[in-house]
Amino acid sequence: MNAFKFGPTTWTNKHHGTRTMLRISEVTVNNLDNNQSIKIPPGSPLSLAAVRSGMRLSFQCKQGVCSSCETLLNGTKVRTCVTKVPDVAKITIKKAPR
């Protein structure tokens, strides 16, 4: 059984005509704080993925200003309230140290 679901994306390039690329329709999110994994569509709010994977987050401003929701996404600090789940097969998240 294939671990990933794919859906086509079509775009037009003026030099090469129309091309089709496969897009991942589910991203595996691994929460390193509690070793839980979930699957979620790419483009979903990262805050939703974090909460569904069992992470406890504070959301104060919901605009990316206060940094109360800072999380490590594949080792890089991001603010979950303004970050979307990237279009890759697998990501890791961990609560950012204060």
Image (cartoon, rainbow, N blue to C red):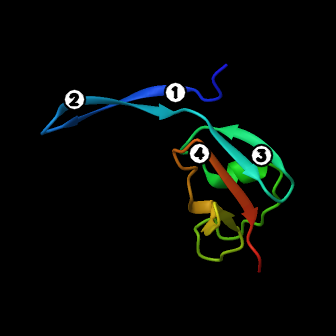
Dot 4 alpha-carbon crowd within 10 angstroms: few under 14, some 14 to 19, many 20 or more: some
Helix, strand or loop for disc 3: helix
Residue beneath disc 2: 18
Residue 51 against residue 75 in the figure, above or below: above
**Left or right of residue 63: residue 60:** right
Q: Check disc 4 and report its element: helix, strand or loop.
A: loop
Which numbered disc flags the more N-terminal residue, 3 or 4?
4
Rendering quarter of residue 16: top left
Distance from Cα at disc 4 to Cα at disc 2: 27 Å
Q: CA distance from mark 1 to mark 3?
A: 22 Å
Quarter residue 13 falls in: top left
Real-space CA distance between mark 3 and mark 4, rounded to the nearest whole angstrom: 12 Å
User: Mark 3 highlights which residue?
Assistant: 52
Q: Amino acid at mark 3?
A: Arg
Q: Which residue is mark 1?
A: 6
* Mark 3 burial class by Cα count in 10 Å: few <14, some 14-19, many 20+: some
Residue 32's label in the rendered image is none
Identity, as a three-letter code, of the amino acid under mark 4:
Ser
- Residue flagged by tag 2: what amino acid is it? Thr
